[in-house]
Amino acid sequence: MISVSIVNVTSYTGLELLRLLACHPQFEVVSVTARSAVGQRLCDVFPQLRALTASSSVHPEMVITEKPARTDLAFVCLPHAAAAEAVLELVQQGTKVVDLSADFRLHDVAVYEQWYKHVHPAPQMLETAVFGLCERYREQIAQASIVANPGCYATTAILALLPAFAAGIVEPDVVVDGKSGISGAGRSPKQNTHYSEANEDISAYGLDGHRHQPEIVQELIAGAEAGGHPLANGLRLTFIPHLVPMTRGILATCYASLKPEAFERYASKEALRELYTEYYADEPFVHVVDTPPHTKWSYGSNHCFIYPVVDKQAQRLIVVSCLDNLMKGASSQAVQNANRLFGLSETTGLAGIGVYP
Amino acid sequence: MISVSIVNVTSYTGLELLRLLACHPQFEVVSVTARSAVGQRLCDVFPQLRALTASSSVHPEMVITEKPARTDLAFVCLPHAAAAEAVLELVQQGTKVVDLSADFRLHDVAVYEQWYKHVHPAPQMLETAVFGLCERYREQIAQASIVANPGCYATTAILALLPAFAAGIVEPDVVVDGKSGISGAGRSPKQNTHYSEANEDISAYGLDGHRHQPEIVQELIAGAEAGGHPLANGLRLTFIPHLVPMTRGILATCYASLKPEAFERYASKEALRELYTEYYADEPFVHVVDTPPHTKWSYGSNHCFIYPVVDKQAQRLIVVSCLDNLMKGASSQAVQNANRLFGLSETTGLAGIGVYP
Amino acid sequence: MISVSIVNVTSYTGLELLRLLACHPQFEVVSVTARSAVGQRLCDVFPQLRALTASSSVHPEMVITEKPARTDLAFVCLPHAAAAEAVLELVQQGTKVVDLSADFRLHDVAVYEQWYKHVHPAPQMLETAVFGLCERYREQIAQASIVANPGCYATTAILALLPAFAAGIVEPDVVVDGKSGISGAGRSPKQNTHYSEANEDISAYGLDGHRHQPEIVQELIAGAEAGGHPLANGLRLTFIPHLVPMTRGILATCYASLKPEAFERYASKEALRELYTEYYADEPFVHVVDTPPHTKWSYGSNHCFIYPVVDKQAQRLIVVSCLDNLMKGASSQAVQNANRLFGLSETTGLAGIGVYP
Amino acid sequence: MISVSIVNVTSYTGLELLRLLACHPQFEVVSVTARSAVGQRLCDVFPQLRALTASSSVHPEMVITEKPARTDLAFVCLPHAAAAEAVLELVQQGTKVVDLSADFRLHDVAVYEQWYKHVHPAPQMLETAVFGLCERYREQIAQASIVANPGCYATTAILALLPAFAAGIVEPDVVVDGKSGISGAGRSPKQNTHYSEANEDISAYGLDGHRHQPEIVQELIAGAEAGGHPLANGLRLTFIPHLVPMTRGILATCYASLKPEAFERYASKEALRELYTEYYADEPFVHVVDTPPHTKWSYGSNHCFIYPVVDKQAQRLIVVSCLDNLMKGASSQAVQNANRLFGLSETTGLAGIGVYP
């Protein structure tokens, strides 16, 4: 068994990792940390873990510590800045890390510091970290010691637009309208995530700039280049997220003008769908569908559903993409990455489909 | 008292009209119709109407009939096509009509027939009907005999973008990403509005074209012209609606590139907000706010909240606008229009603010 | 106009009072307090109040202070203990008070101190305070200087069971199973009211005793005595509340064994309904209905719906009762009481019916 | 592999069976039926099944037929009456059946016909069918050819009260107040399960008698007898269900007076909890917890959580019990039963814990 620690296990992403790893045949959770719950057992914080069977890879009576034990693998569920420091220590002791924070996603430290407003604690490691999107970097991930698990909005938007940018069919001028369930805001209670405020309400936020924007830009530029259609003048991308009254699920509606020659070719649904289907032909977790997808299809699973279509009148590509923000948008994608890190099949422990309805 | 009939009272918009008119000092409901409930009393269909007091303008024991009585005013809550036929009859007998359907919103019968896929039953009346947005046409409404109450998405998007088009500050290339609560789909149960399907889910729909698109286009073109900035080459507008797991509320996030000279001027929040605030300075129901608005602010009321902002990096105008789809998006806007039709203050019977939280 | 202050206006009950009083023809809000928001304007805390018209009785720009001004009337929205101290000061300066806390609901100071675990700050005033249930004490309320607004669960359960106890038809052995929307827990964010925890979940709480229990007991004993059927051996009452994933609404399902002779008489639905209908014949806000009621019928209104029925096999009376916990369960009942305090019609400013759907 | 058919696969319980069996190591779905969808593929009805991997035991392209193929095992997801006829045919051809309907749950055909208002189609088989509650009848199930999967409310209430009746500590006078998510009403859209009606609402239903009542009575009487404390005078049980605005989850709050001698002994939390803990000591899916349980703890899993407590003032036992109505209340309990039928470990394919939050 591969020994695993979960750093900041009392987060929602930490809890989801417990659920997933409890059924994972190769990983065994041997250490869990959380500053605010040192000395408590997992089942004190999450009474529902009493349901874990004796034979599971997670033990409900495990005591939460301040520092992780030395393990083969660690999942870091800390907020940015704190995450980088923890990752640094873990890597130095030889632990492979999947970092769920934003600290190692951006390659350019200046961009990081501009968006996150603090000095990066470990800029030297930005080069070795790999952006943890298996659909793009599975070979590099297999060799990495730090995997930077992508943001939930970023995963959704990048998967939606990669095929179009790789094929060079759209202008470098994009609007991404994101909609997320409220668990994306984390487990700490706040006024805007108080039930009575968030229920029966939708609102936009991050209108002065949301931190997933540079991730999306970085990866679409890279994807365009990898596809042989580099963006000479960069990418003009507006990303606006919205808070939707549901716990889980994230949906991105992406808009980009088709290049005139591409419009000729992809005005038919079939041609466009074929482009997308081929791009994701071998992916176990990305599915190009022929009806508009629903976030609930992915509830509790690692699956992403994508629906591309053309507004013929406006000659615009529209791609709707959705997934579970805590899963493919966080914890199950982290397990997918961890599987790669240890040479396991990517689908190990991730076979389930969405809980519906 | 002005006598009122409500045609197809068993719809959600019909029910909301009952609630509003029960407290209206000048209108008295004397006739209610609904094909599927002929012979039943209002309180048989809606037991909660038992709460109406004896002195109210609506009587819970009123019997539903097939045809409306001859009244001064009628609200028509039928689906399109059926609505036009009913309106025709009502107008011929001298009744003023607020039509909540789409039948008289589009001035161009060809556009109507292209989007609604049937022959318009009363094309000759398209010219006399007035688009029922008081913020634009209050003088014309006062003289009208048919007011075409705007669509819920259309109201939200048009109010969001009118100031920008009237001032000529944006390119004629717009994306409107709409999000609506589920009551917008009406009162008849369907698979996609079944609780277990719609709860904890968000999805896009109308991806092959939604019927509120031509309304928005028509009114933005007219607004641009009225503001002295006509659109020489028309308007390229993509509108994609989404179904959000809440009963009420509609929010539009609108994206348009700023013209270069406008960007210089409106990159500052203050200048942009001033433009918007001035445009709506005298409006009792449209409020330009300085934090992103929440649909719940408008719950059960006739108020619309608008938040304009610029994405400086992308030089794009973003306007977020929201209201209650059954109210300013339907029934209370209908009452506002009816107030105009009979020379009453627009706010009569509409003083309440949103029920929050 | 009668001058009004709202103490702790930043609570949900304070906000609801603002909404109601904005349309009240006789009360004018001239002073608002809140320790945590001193110096802020109402519209800073609640941006949606921008929708208030200039002519309203509430001014969105009103500045929040620490202490209330001297007014004719005050609504106190503080938690218990803090409330009693504020009430004391207000009464001493000649202000009539509607206290929304529990501090003056229980007549017996020992019972209060047992349940609330602290010394009552003003026991001498318990005698002069009147329990603010107009359906029982409207004459006393008219003469009072302190009205103790009943708890939300207590209002629901008492209204459900009063007719049965007044008529002496049930054994003094009752189960009240309460279900409340989450706004009942107040406006301060906590873990159990965090959206992601409370959504798509139901749970029981207060299993070691909930503080509304003694209120219900006190008032059912009094109601039995007033009806000429005093309870010689007291009342054995179990009350268990539940948290339901909705913002507003409270429903009580009440169970009590029918006395054998009463079973003979009330086994027929009609006889039982007649008993209830007669009891509430003149009440503008309590409605005995003939189908099981829905909390949503009362959304945003002061109305209560009651459905009594007999389980013939078990010879048990079941009464289902529901209302809006922030309205008849708090703020609109407070206005109803305030109307009585100043000799106005009880329905003044409370004419609206529930916002549905 | 054991071959499996699912009859009426387009129901929610059918869909959940697909999800569970897709990961089951021993069962292979080879036949699916649904009268309304004959000729369609599974993925036409449920597009999310596209996420199933090639190696899964369920094939998304499988065509729905009218009649099931001959298989080792069948799950019957039909409504009552239709179910019995299908079961009859299946058993005659040698297929073992787990019937999710009510047709074989009640041993007494007269009780069945009284509550279900039609003649039982196969009364002769009532004797051979086994009530599918492994916690009570695991030995009998292993030998059965028909397993009658219990109702969702019945499972919740029976598990809550069995230890008390088996130990003879309560009077035979019980109130069960049930609360269910809306998926319990099935997949067909109806007015009361229309999103806009059911959202933000709670209501009681079945006030004239709900069909799970006799199941609960039958099994508590049997449990009392099995525990050596037979109920000489039967059981007076009132059961009232409520519709809660959530998709999944069921919670029963059960009330019964403690016998005087039992009150002496079980007034302490510890003694009561010990009684319950011992009763379920070896159960993998029933967990006695020490804080009030939340339905969401069981979301998507086969686990049931039980919390017993005493109201000392009223000397009443209160037991709160909850589970996922589509899982332990239907489909995963059906798989647990099927595991028993074929000599597999009961937990096979059911290892997952609840998806939280």
Image (spheres, coloured by chain):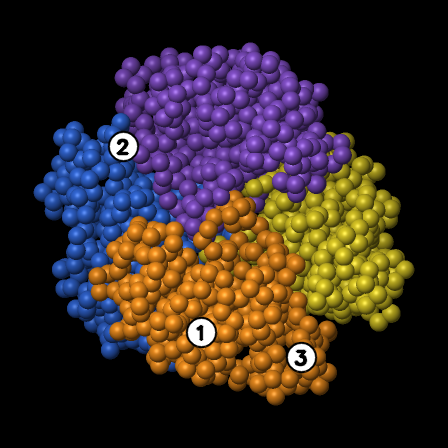
Chain colours: A blue, B purple, C yellow, D orange
The picture quadrant where one finds residue A186 is: bottom left
Labelled disc at residue D170 = 3
Toward the bottom, the furthest residue is D228
Amino acid on which disc 2 is placed? Asp
Give x and y (percent) for residue A68.
32, 73
Q: Is residue A103 visible?
A: no
Which residue position holds label 1? D147
Label 1 in the same subunit as label 2: no
- Mark 1 element type: strand
User: Which residue is identified by label 2?
Assistant: A311
Residue for point 64% across, 22% down: B69
Distance CA(mark 1)–CA(mark 2): 53 Å
Q: 10 Å neighbourhood of mark 2: few (<14), some, or many (≥20)?
A: many
Q: Amino acid at mark 1?
A: Val
**Residue depicted at x 52% and y 17%:** B88
| Same chain, labels 3 and 1 | yes
Question: The residue under label 3 is which amino acid type?
Answer: Val
